[in-house]
Image (tube, helix red, strand yellow):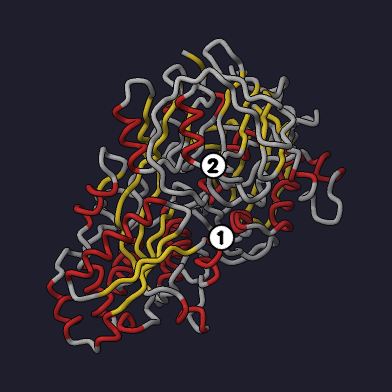
Amino acid sequence: MSNGFFRRSPVRILTLAVLPLVALLSACGSSSKPQATSGSTTTTVPATYPTSHTLNLSFLEDPGQPPDPDVYYAGEGLLLTRNLYEGLVQYQPGTANRIVIPSLATSWSISGDGKTYTFQLRQGVKFHDGTTFTSAAVEPSFKRRAVVDGGPAYMVMGITKVTTPGPYTVVITLNQPNTAFLDYLASAYGPVMESPTAIALHAGSDHDQTYLETHDIGTGPYTLTEAKVGVAYQLQAFPGYWGPKPYYTTVNLPVIDDLSTEEIELNDGELAGILHDLTTTAAVQYQKSSKFSFYELPVFEDEMVYVNENKGAFTSQAFRQAFLEAINIPDIVASVFPGGRAVVPDQIAPGHLIASQYAKQTIPYDPSVLTKLAAALPSGERDITLAYDTGAPDDQLIAEEIGAEMQGDGITAKVVGEETSSIYGAVGSVSTAKSAAAPNALVDYFWPDADNPYTWAHINYDPSGGLEYEACNVPGIANLDSEAAATGNLALYNQVTNLVQSSGCWLNMADKNDAMVFQPWVQGVAAAHVVAAPEMLLLSKLYPK
């Protein structure tokens, strides 16, 4: 999509948690209360019981980026940004279906040419600084996102004009039709409304970025009262919130950088829940436990294999295809995800994202082809490097399973962990030495930005999309993606799928669920979950039993 008066589409960068593999520790029954990490303004983390209005959760690793909605572009930090800020529209929580519902806009219409969006805005809304929300807030919010130029800036890049016929009417004009635009506005990464008073007051030399490291200027049910990087975050219910008032008026989010410690505190009742990155062992044991509520919630998240077409025998399309065909997906899913945390995919797109007749994954399981090709290779070319993201224990297990299967097919796979920064350092490096230094194949997980197939195909397959990890270049995909976004023709994504699968560069290994465990007295978890926003809940929807 071409630029309007806003800036270019930047590369998407994610920050992923790094954690060890640990087994689930049994509940100790201790009545002692742990002290908060040094530096927190909360000296003791109290146990949260059904009668308390304090909810204790945690981050396994610091979000890694400030809770600035125009900067933040990772995973678990969405718990902050999406409870502090609101956009014009949102996805309906508690369902796997694509339903866009009102938020700060109460209704909207789209012109016949698909370029003009008219929104009627909600009245009686206050920003956290006391400023009244009107149409005057929309253009400054969009423009701030553009000038900050963070990962999600591409969502406003096609806007050419914002007009305000009245205090509660706003008209947004795009430079060309984009059927993904409403999904951008509903996305967890989408543009939110920010107080124009605060934008001007705290602009400084970096467009409010320093201020928003420790403050917020949103309209959400919570306001940010503590933000100490690597230590702790805290949310307080905003007394002037326009919607239903949350039961939990204080949410504590200390940074607990060890999963075993999180599990101990959950088992002792000090934490209300764990929202992400449970190991397979922990997930299975919590699932079987009668003492906790275990949730497997639909989410747009896949485990993927990315193949480097620029290295060794993998420069051959036939070899890449044979490599993917030698991976036994059902066996690996059953081994790594017992109990239903993930299912065998039948589409190359994430489950629930696109109608089932589209984007079919058609790569068959047949290891015999690879066995024949491997036998004909010089001995040195039978050794490959298979990497995984050290921030995800499931990635390691999948890589090890694939490595074991390759061994039986005549390929020796060296399975290595790579830090997230190293993985992103090789993104888009088709013409540089980085592609040669990158592994032959990578196991990593992926989710699109929104409930729209454009944000899956463009981000994951286009060299300019940001997550084309292994620098596989497939001519024609970018033009098809742009045409599909402009027209809404889902059949075009089948053409993308065919090109992707014929390249031998991608394989969808598993459609994952969000695995969460909570104390049994925490209610509303499923209703607070959004399929397009992994590892995130709308906290105002939680309440005690």
Q: Is residue 368 visible?
A: yes
Left or right of 206? Residue 290 is: left
Farthest-out residue, top: 51
Asked if 219 appears above or below 277 in the picture, the reply is above
User: Which of the two labelled residues, at mark 2 and mark 1, occupies the earlier sequence position?
Assistant: 1
Q: Which one is in front in this view, the residue at disc 2 or the one at disc 1?
A: 2
Question: Does 413 sit left or right of 77 as displayed?
Answer: left
The residue lying at 36 percent from left, 59 percent from top is 304
Quadrant of the image containing the N terminus: bottom right
Q: Badge 2: few (under 14), some or many (20 or more) residues near its Cα, within 10 Å?
A: many
Q: CA distance from mark 2 to mark 1?
A: 22 Å
Q: Which mark is residue 60?
A: 2
Q: Is the residue marked by circle 1 packed among few (<14), some (14-19), or many (20+) residues within 10 Å?
A: some
Query: What type is the residue that disc 2 sits on?
Result: Leu
Q: Position of residue 256 (x, y in %)?
A: 57, 39
What amino acid type should be assigned to the residue bearing mark 1? Arg
Residue drawn at 39 percent across, 37 percent down = 515
User: Image point 52% across, 64% down: which residue?
Assistant: 466
> In the rendering, which numbered label is found on residue 461?
none
Give how far across and how far down residue 362 sits, in percent: 21, 62
User: Element type at marker 2?
Assistant: loop
Residue 48, image quadrant: top right
